[in-house]
Image (spheres, helix red, strand yellow):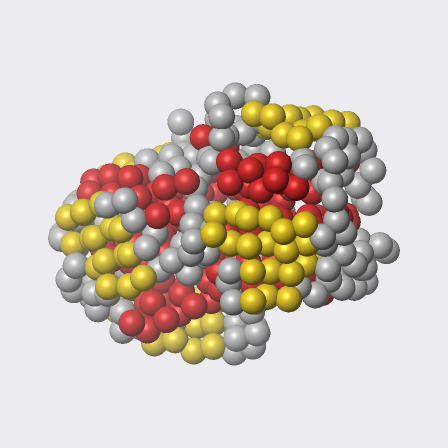
Amino acid sequence: MSSLELGPLRRAAGTVRLPGSKSISNRVLLLAALAQGRTDVRGLLDADDTRVMREALGKLGTPIRAKQAELFLGNAGTAFRPLTAVLALSGGEYRLSGVARMHERPIRDLVDALRGMGARIDYLGEEGYPPLAIHPGSIAAGQTLKVRGDVSSQYVSALLMALPLAGGGTIEVEGELISKPYVEITLNLMRHFGVEVARHGWSRFAVPGSPYVSPGMVFVEGDASSASYFLAAGAIGGGPVRVEGVGRGSIQGDVRFTEVLEKMGARVAMGEDWIEASGRAPLRAFDLDLNHIPDAAMTAAAMALFADGTCSLRNIASWRVKETDRIAAMAAELGKLGAGVEAGADYLKVTPHRLNAGIAVDTYDDHRMAMSLSLAALGGVAVRINDPDCVAKTFPDYFRVFARIAQ
């Protein structure tokens, strides 16, 4: 396994142009494939997760017309879940698989909702998990379907994007819908492609049966989750660090990471298309519900190493079913670095102590573990990142870009 030594670093300052948003990129690719007309996509993320979506759509055709295909979708939830829903309503024979971790990530709630519509889906391995076999089903238009909202918001997003293909229908969410800003991205982009969903709170969505129509050109804004690492570096290491490509006009919920920065005492400035952060450790400790920004919350966990007391991250149960069990993984690695850590089913408490030098941290084939833990080197200690190439999932150039702002 390869590794990368970072630091010791004591300062961060500079400007970063962000890669395209993964969440927006894969939604736009799918909607463009479903839409009437040609779509010119600008700013698309070029990384592993978008590559598997592009390869899948290449096999299926744009517009989707293949009635038989075997698709390998890596560990990309933003590809696997929506394609499951779309293909279940497409009247063909499909096989969907991924890496070993993808086969450990639950999909039962989505499959149950689709089966309730008349879709025919079989599990090819363990019940409730990928890989899947999809067969032609008997789908009636205008149905009401129920889906749990407390495991992954991707189930709701997948159903929202697929339902226009089945003549529309109504989605009723059972329980609390987590990660609501990601569903907001889906609704926003569907509207951009001509389908207006009527939302009743966060528990009911009425989806029309109108077709998707290309808006002609779509510009993918910079990735707000990726922005969090550089903004955190500015808050810890002096700054200012400015990220370009995302700002006040963003449709991504992770721009609200700026609220965490301000809570910790960092100075934040924001324009329509940029955000800037500066500050200096030690930062103020926090106790926050981070359910709405589960990805950027990983960055907050690493920033806890530089706080003046115990930091509490609450309502983050979705971490358990991400690229790895992120609660367990983050607890283990922050502990190695010297922090006191308490991990629960849906929370993490981090008490900073003197950072241990020369520690090798594991990344669990999880891009966000690698990028978050890189911040530890700003504590003036050398940190070795094992398997740094896992960042290729969403940000292949991350460490090269990080090196430009960190000294």
In the image: residue 52, left or right of residue 327? right
In this rendering, the count of numbered labels is 0
Instruction: Give left or right: position of 135 versus 11.
Output: right
Residue at 81% from the left image edge and 33% from the top image edge: 66
* Residue at the (68%, 54%) spot, across then down: 169
* Picture residue at 20% right of the left edge, 43% below the top: 335
Is residue 7 something that shows in the picture?
no
Residue 42 location in percent, x, y? 71, 59
Q: Residue 334 in the image: x percent, y percent?
A: 24, 45
The image quadrant of residue 241 is bottom left
- Give the residue at the far right of this rendering: 37
Q: Is residue 205 visible?
A: yes
Which quadrant is home to the C terminus?
Answer: bottom left
Q: Quadrant of the N terminus?
A: top left
Instruction: Residue 256: give x, y in percent of width and height.
Output: 43, 68
Picture layout, residue 123 above or below residue 115: above
Q: Is residue 369 left or right of residue 77?
A: left
Residue at figure coordinates x 66%, y 31% from the top left: 120
Q: Nearer the viewer, residue 339 or 89?
A: 89
* Viewer-side residue, 119 vs 26: 119
**Along the line of sight, the residue nearer the viewer: 35 or 224:** 35
Q: Quadrant of residue 228?
A: bottom left
Q: Is residue 252 above or below residue 355?
A: below
Quarter of the image for residue 387 reads top left
x and y percentages locating residue 386 in the rendered image: 36, 35
When the figure is inspected, residue 208 is found, relative to residue 95, above or below; the finding is below
